[in-house]
Image: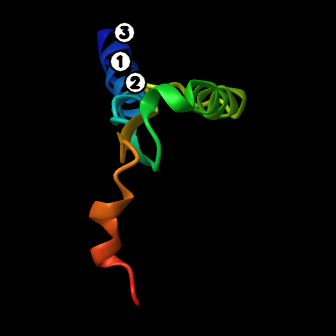
């Protein structure tokens, strides 16, 4: 009887091992870059609406994605050198 219990234990562990290993896989965290031409104080409702839209789709900031905001601070004169004539 002990042999059957041992074989059952080994068989159950072998069957459950791939499931446990699969559950431990890390999820990919997406990085979103947001570049605004104005200041951060100029469009807070747009940034919040963007976050709310992502939440409605099931994404959570910090868990599924990271959002990095960069603001030009109305300094378009610095950017003009990169634009074609």
The mark that comes first in sequence, 2 or 1, is 1
Left or right of 36? Residue 6 is: left
Name which residue lies at 34% across and 52% down: 75
- Give how far across and how far down residue 70 sits, in percent: 35, 42
Q: Position of residue 13 (x, y in %)?
A: 35, 24
- For the point 63% across and 25% down, the residue is 45
**Outermost residue toward the bottom in this view:** 85
The residue tagged with tag 3: helix, strand or loop?
loop
In the picture, residue 73 is in which quadrant? top left
Q: Looking at the picture, tell me which residue is in the foreground, 39 or 5.
A: 39
Name the residue that disc number 3 marks.
1
User: Given contact means CB atoms under 8 Å apart, are the residues at marks 2 and 1 in contact?
Assistant: no
In the image: residue 44, left or right of residue 17: right
Label 1 SS: helix
- Disc nearest the viewer among 2 and 1: 2
Between 45 and 5, the one lying in front of the other is: 45
Q: Which residue carries the number 1 mark?
A: 9
Closer to the N terminus: mark 3 or mark 1?
A: 3
Residue in the image at 66% along x and 26% along y: 52
Residue 28 visible to an observer of this rendering: no
Quadrant placement of the N terminus: top left
| 33 to 12, vertically: above or below | below
Using the image, determine if residue 67 lies above or below residue 78: above
Q: Dot 2 corresponds to which residue?
A: 62
């Amino acid at each position: 009887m002990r042999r059957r219990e041992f074989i059952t234990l080994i068989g159950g562990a072998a069957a459950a091992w791939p499931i446990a290993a699969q559950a431990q896989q890390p999820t990919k965290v997406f990085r979103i870059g947001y570049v605004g031409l104005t200041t951060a104080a100029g469009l807070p409702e747009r940034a919040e609406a963007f976050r709310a839209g992502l939440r409605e789709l099931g994404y959570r900031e910090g868990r599924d994605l990271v959002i990095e905001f960069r603001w030009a601070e109305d300094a378009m004169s610095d950017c003009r050198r990169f634009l074609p004539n």
